[in-house]
Image: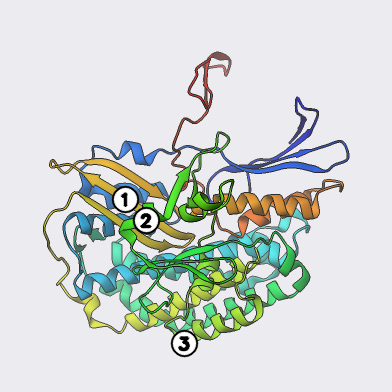
Amino acid sequence: MENQTQAGLRRIAIEPISRVEGHGKITLLLDDEGHVKQARLHIVEFRGFEKFIEGRPYYELPLLVQRLCGICPVSHHLAAAKAIDQINGVKQLTPAALKLRQLLHWGQLLQSHALHFFHLASPDLLFGYDSDVSKRNIIGVLKEYPEIAVQGVKIRKFGQEVIRAVSGKRIHGIAALPGGMNQPLDREVYQYLTAEIDQIVEWSKDAVELARRLCLEDTELFNSFASTESPYMSLTDEKGGLEFYDGNLRVKNADGSILNDQFPNERYTDLIQEEAKSWSYMKFPFLRSIREAQGGDSGWYRVGPLARINNCDSISTPLAEHYRQDFMKIAGNPLAHQNLAFHWARMIEALHCAESIQKVLADPDLFSLDLVAKGNRQSSGIGIIEAPRGTLFHHYEVNDDDQVTMANLIVSTTSNNFAMNEAVCSAANQHIDGNEVTPGLLNLLEVAVRSYDPCLSCATHAIGKMPLHVEMLDSKGQLIHQLSKNSNGEFS
C-alpha cells in the first residue's frame, strides 16, 4: 500500500507481514529521490492479558495464560507454573515432575522451531528472496522439495505428539500444577515416540546441515544482510551450558565479554527496564545498566536461538555440541551477529531437543506417580524460561485470598522489538534506499523480521496510554459512530 504523507514523503506499508505468527505491519517513508527517511515495524493488535488475569485465583494461571498463543502455549504454561511453584513455596520439584516438564518443553521447542524453519522461512531460503511470490510457501516447497517439506512436517508432528503425551492435547493441554504435574507420561503415545525418535534425530541433523548450507551459499549476503551488533541475553546452567527450563540469566556484550552472569531471576527488574512507544502495542525492554549510563536508545538487546548459542559455553548433547562449535567457528567473531544466522542456530537447538528427548524417553521416572511437592505459601513468584523465541518472564503477586493482584509478562518477542526495528531499518537502507521499490525488495524487509520468528500475538501487552480507534457500523456496514483516543489518553 502506498500513499503520500503530510510532509510530502511517500509512505509504503507492508500490511500484514506474511509468514509470522500474529499481525503486524512495516512502514517506510521515502523522499522524492527514494531515500529511506524512516522504517518501522508496528504491532497493531492489543491483547492485555496482564490486566484481565488480575483478580483470578493464582492456581488457574498456567491454564489461563497459555491462551495467549496457539503456537507456544507450552512456554507460557511452564513459565506460569514455575511462578506458582514459588507462590506455593516449592523450591525443588520431584525428579519425575521435573523430567516431565523438561520433556514437554523440548517437545514445544522442537515443533515450534520446525514450524518456523520449514513452513515459514524455508521458502525464502530455498527459492530466493525475490522469487515468484506464488511459490514462496510450504505448498511450493512440497512441490519442488518434497523430501525436505515432508521431513519438516513430520518433525513438527513428533514435537506435537510429545506435548500430547505429557499434557493430553497437542495444543492447550493441562499438565502443570502448583508444585508439580498432574499425571505421568501417556503409555500409548510413548510407544509412538520411542518408535520414531531415532529417525527424528537423523532428520534434525539433516535440518542443521540444510540450514548451514543455505546460509553459506551466499556468504556476502549472509554476513551483511540486516546484521547489527548487540548484547545478547539468555538463561544458562550453572556451568554456562545451554539451558531452556532452569538456570540464571547471562548477558554478553556485543564484543563477547560478559556483562552479567548467573544473574538471579528474582532480581530481573534490576536488569531490565520497560518502555512504551506511541506507535506500537508492544513494549520496549532495555538493559537498565547500559540505558542509565549511555541514555538515548542504548541498552537494547536480543534473545532467542542466536542469543542462546552465542551465550552458552557448551551443549550437553553430542551432535548439537558438534554443530555449535562448527557454527561459532564459522559465524562467530567472537559472536555471531548475522540476521540470517538465527535460522542456523534454531536448527542446532532443534537437534539438541531431539537428542534430549531420545535420552529422557529411557528414564522410568516418566511413569512415576511421585509428582507433587509442597511448601509454605508466598505472596509472589517469578517464572523465567527459554521459550522458542527467547527468554520469557512471568511475574505475579497475589493476596491472602489467592487472587492475582499484579501480573507482568515480558514475552520473548518483546525483548527483540527494538532489534527487529533495527533490522528493518538496516535492510531498507541496504536494499531499498534510492532504488525502485519492487515486491522482491519489500520481501527483504519481511525476511529481516521473519528471522526472529516473532510471535506478535504473544507479545502485545502494552504499558502506558496507547492510541485506540473504535468504529461502530450498522447492519449495512455504514459508519454510525466512532471514537478515538490518542497516546496522551485524550478522546475525540
Depth check, mark 1 against mark 2: the one in front is 2
Q: Residue at point 53% right, 15% down?
A: 492
- As drawn, the label of residue 322 is none
Q: Are marks 1 and 2 in contact (CB under 8 Å)?
A: yes
For the N terminus, which image quadrant?
A: top right
Other residues around mark 1 within 10 Å, as few (<14) / some (14–19) / many (≥20): many
Q: Earlier in the sequence, mark 3 or mark 1?
A: 3
Q: Earlier in the sequence, mark 1 or mark 2?
A: 2
Secondary structure found at label 2: helix
- As drawn, the label of residue 318 is 3
- As drawn, the label of residue 395 is 1
In the rendered image, the residue lying farthest to the front is 293
> How far apart are the alpha carbons under marks 1 and 2?
10 Å
Secondary structure found at label 3: helix
> How far apart are the alpha carbons under marks 3 and 1?
35 Å
Query: Where does label 2 land, which residue?
Result: 268
Depth check, mark 3 against mark 1: the one in front is 1
Q: Residue 349: x and y, percent?
A: 49, 73
Q: Specify the amino acid type for callout 2.
A: Tyr
Q: Residue 28: x and y, percent?
A: 73, 41
Q: Residue at point 75% right, 24% down?
A: 6
Q: Residue 461: x and y, percent?
A: 44, 41
